[in-house]
Amino acid sequence: MRSVPRRFNQFTTKLLDLPQDVAMDLPRMTMIGNVQLYIENHRGVLHFSSDRLLLAFPKGRLEVHGKELVIRAILTEEVLVEGVIGEIKFYP
């Protein structure tokens, strides 16, 4: 029965021509090379250090590994990270 709301969201998204990240509360990530990462729709920073970033999402968490990581900007649902990004993992 859990798939019914999900299918309804997918149907509505297609019908109204909405981006899936907005309608289904999914993360949106924009990466420039391996030096800049812009993440939208997060729900908070769980951990941050110069080599690891852990973000919470409504449906999981995101882990970023790298070197010399710096948070350049952070807003309610957006974060901009710079440094040498080596690995990104999403855990549902």
Image (cartoon, rainbow, N blue to C red):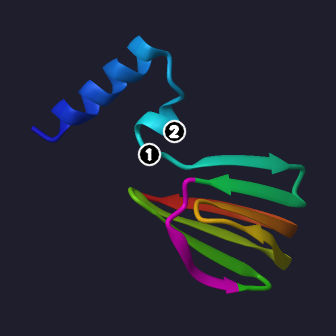
Q: Is 10 situated above or below 91? A: above
Residue 22, relative to residue 52: is it above or below? Answer: above
Characterize the magenta stretch by its predominant secondary structure. Answer: strand
Point 39% across, 56% down: residue: 59
| Residue type beneath disc 2 | Asp
Q: Quadrant of residue 52?
A: bottom right
Which residue is label 1 attached to?
25
Residue 33 location in percent, x, y? 90, 50
- Label pair 1/2, CB-CB below 8 angstroms: yes
Q: Residues within 10 Å of mark 1 (few under 14, many from 20)?
A: some
- Residue shown at 26%/27% (left/top)? 7
Q: Residues within 10 Å of mark 2 (few under 14, many from 20)?
A: few
Looking at the image, which residue is at 79% across and 67% down?
81
Amino acid found under the numbered disc labelled 1: Asp
Q: Is residue 8 left or right of residue 51?
A: left
Which image quarter holds the C terminus?
bottom left
Q: Which residue is mark 2?
A: 21
What is the residue that sits farthest to the left in this orientation? Answer: 1
Vertical position of residue 17 compared to residue 26: above or below: above
- Callout 1: SS: loop
Decide which of 20, 92 is in the foreground and name it. Answer: 20
Q: Which segment is the magenta one? A: 41-48
Left/right of residue 85 with respect to residue 9 in the rendered view: right
- Residue 46 on the magenta span: yes
